[in-house]
Image (cartoon, grey):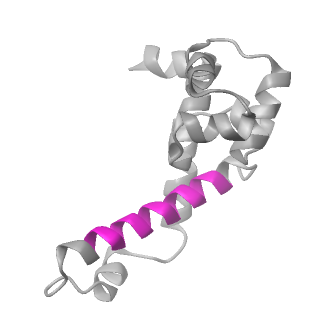
Amino acid sequence: MEIVANTLMLHKGRKIERVRKLRGWTQAELGEKLHITKQAVSKLEQSENVSDEKLKEIAEALGVTFEGLKEFNEERVLYNTNNFYENCGVTATNLSANIETVNNPLKETIEMFERQLEIVRSELIEVLKGRK
């Protein structure tokens, strides 16, 4: 597990891929923002080294800071996210009290989870934008 974590710390292409996926974007969507093809994005994500100049351009396209992308670490994101939720006063009891689960059709339940996922993604992006 430690080897995998160290590889991600050094592999800039994988950092780009993880942030893109946190955004919920496809390679084609990121490619549109960078004015490159989906195949070029794939090649970037497979590259262990990406120049700082290119990384700045990608960070801007992803809507995060250069430092946030360069220093991206999933453990740090999870740590910040956990601390955010632990200190926000929201508990599982509070959440379950506000969610009607008995007569909720499947479609509405799926839509609710998708909205919650989008909120979490946007909060993670805010963490990457510089809130360390």
Q: Is residue 67 above or below residue 118?
A: above
Residue situated in front as seen by the camera: 84 or 72? 72
Front residue of 93/18: it is 18
Q: Residue at x 56, y 36 (%)?
A: 28
Q: Position of residue 48 (x, y in %)?
A: 62, 12
Residue 12, image quadrant: top right
Residue 32, percent from left and from top: 67, 39
Task: Give the total of numbered labels.
Answer: 0
Residue found at the very far left of the displayed protein? 102
Along the horizontal axis of the image, is 104 left or right of 15?
Answer: left
Residue 77, position as x, y percentages in the image: 56, 45
Horizontal relation, residue 127 to residue 18: left or right: right
Relative to 113, 18 lies left or right: right
Which SS does the magenta portion mostly show?
Answer: helix
Residue 94 image position (x, y, % from top left): 36, 83
Residue 54 picture quarter: top right
Is 26 drawn above or below residue 132 in the view shown? above
110 within the magenta span: yes
Bounds of the magenta segment: 109-126
Q: Is residue 95 above or below residue 86?
A: below
Q: Please tell me which residue lies in front, 48 or 94.
A: 48
Residue closest to the eye, 28 or 66: 28
